[in-house]
Amino acid sequence: MTEKIRSLKNLFLYECLFTLTFWNSISLSVENELSTSVSHNLPEDGPDNENKTQPLLYTSNHKSKASFDWVVIQNTTESLSLSEIKNEDVKKLIALLSNFKKGSRLQYLTLANISVDWEYFTKILQTVWHSSIEYFNINNMIQLSDVTNCEFDYSDTSMKALTMKKVLITDLYFSQDDLYKIFSDMNIEALTIAESEMIHMLCPSSDSPFKYLNFLKNDLTDLLFQRCEKLIHLEKFILQRNKFESLSKVSFMTSSMKSLKYLDMSSNLLHHDGAEKRCQWADSLAKLNLSYNQLTESVFECLPVNIKILDLQNNQIASVPKGIAELKSLRELNLALNRLTDLPGCSVFPALAALNMEMNSILTPSADFFQSCQRVVELRAGRNPFKCSCELRAFIRLEKQSRRELSGWPEAYMCQYPEDLRGTQLKDFHLSELSCNTTLLLVTALLLTLVLVAVVAFLCIYFDALWYVRMIWQWTQTKRRAWHSYPREQENILQFHAFISYSERDSLWVKNELIPNLEKGEGCVQLCQHERNFVPGKSIVENIINCIEKSYKSIFVLSPNFVQSEWCHYELYFAHHKLFSESSNSLILILLEPIPPYVIPARYHKLKVLMAKRTYLEWPKERSKRALFWANLRATISINLPMADGKRCGESD
């Protein structure tokens, strides 16, 4: 516990020291004699010697607050950050950094807002190079002038990574080789020069130990590292936001980088013309970022064959060609923000496991994707202008059946078309199987048509529809002929009290009972009987129609014989037609003999309806009741008819 407290005290005192010196522009100096006198107190490496001696701060007797003389006796911190360093501060800074020899605990150094000449910068860098510092960061540095060639000693260093951001060279006339050579030959693992308007970088003069290079946001072009075979250990290369144009030249730049695994070429001006020479990438390249460029579908002709992760986001790709060479190792593919109209198949991506298709132009994704991309477990296809149709329904159904993850579901998946479904989430979109399956729809329609035809045929046969059609035709033709032959006689004048319809088998009862009892005696009843009142030369149907229309009533003598007679059926049909066309109560039914319902044929459905809804007169077997029968019948057909001499029946002179 005591050792931890001492360490914290040391750290606090140490930070206070550098804050007072550099941030407040306090001049620093190193007392060499004092340093020599106390050098025997410097700790050796190892945890046992960390807290044996406290850091000492020695102050001179000068009254000026801006002048402190100090020496570092022991260093217990691992990082140091200094700011606002100018030419006049360089000697003091170098004197300070010289105290951190190899074996010191200081590993991280950050210098910010530096404004020094090239000569002073190289001295600072050389001092740091031979110190214990492993990670050196420079932010916002202005190189004022005098960029010249200098000899730099790269030996005996602890340095692992150098990071320089926002470096500005103000010298207008200098040799580019003098500037870049000092960086290209560094024997460190990681180098970052970012946001510095760098236009070129030399190829190392010998095999370089670089494993990581980051040239973010500069002005580098296709000329970088062409025919450079010295970066054999480079594993990660970041060239984001530069000015590269040719994808094939980029591929040849990497061809000799035998260890390269990751390359970031995003936010450049890359394009690829299919007519260009074939691309040649490093065989070891596994991850490639080509997002935010100007690439079209021809990019698939210029890709590393062993690539595993490929980012083609925000380009101008409209399709994924099927005739390209197989990318057998590709596991992740990002095609978001392109112009694709459908999900690609996986015939050329047999190992694909993750696909991003967000923000394209997909209306109705093909269900073939799920059949050909069996290994895809993660699919991002949201924020596309989906057209809610049957094809989309098939996509949703297959997605639910599969075991893959549909990222962003359901919030990012909405209908864009048609207009009435815009904003509807795909999970809420439903269409019946019948409306989407054309074969099923045709089969169903055919079956329904056949059933309808069968029902209509059955009804036509059961109700004798053809017979009714024939009767309608006969009635229409009769009316037409009568109109053309006797137009003035179309105003019907009643000539008979009743038309009698009966079967020939019941003619004896009609002649012996019905006609004598109605026509003789008082009342002057006139009956229309086919045997005596049909006009020779006219058709039977025409005579029936004329008699019915010129009669006040129509009397039907019903019996089992009646329903067996074809002509009785005609007469009943025409009389029933008059009943509905003239809204008259003109039918009189006389039941001569009981008629069992099963005896009545199906086509006599009108007769069944009439017998069920209308009152009929039943011929009494007892003679005592027949007088009442005739009286009721006479009363039903009682009407005054005009006579041939202008008088009415029943009137006397």
Image (cartoon, helix red, strand yellow):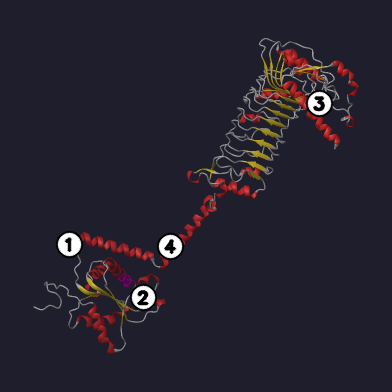
- The mark lying in front, picked from 3 and 2, is 3
> Disc 1 and disc 2: Cα gap in Å?
39 Å
- Identify the mark nearer the N-term, 3 or 1: 3
The label shown at residue 106 is 3
Which residue bears the numbered disc 2?
A: 612
Q: Residues within 10 Å of mark 3 (few under 14, many from 20)?
A: many
Which residue bears the numbered disc 1?
A: 488
x, y percent for residue 387: 53, 43
Q: Which amino acid does the dot numbered 3 rest on? A: Leu
Q: Residues within 10 Å of mark 2 (few under 14, many from 20)?
A: few
x, y percent for residue 216: 68, 25
Q: Is mark 4 in CB contact (under 8 Å) with mark 3?
A: no
Magenta segment boundaries in residue numbering: 567-572
Residue 218 visible in rendering: yes
Q: Which amino acid does the dot numbered 1 rest on? A: Arg
Judged left or right of residue 45, residue 188 is left
> Disc 4 and disc 1: Cα gap in Å?
41 Å
Residue 206 visible in rendering: no
Q: Which amino acid does the dot numbered 2 rest on? A: Ala
- The mark lying in front, picked from 3 and 1, is 3
Which residue bears the numbered disc 4?
A: 456
Q: Residue at x 60, y 27 (%)?
A: 294
Q: Is mark 3 in CB contact (under 8 Å) with mark 2?
A: no
- Identify the mark nearer the N-term, 2 or 4: 4
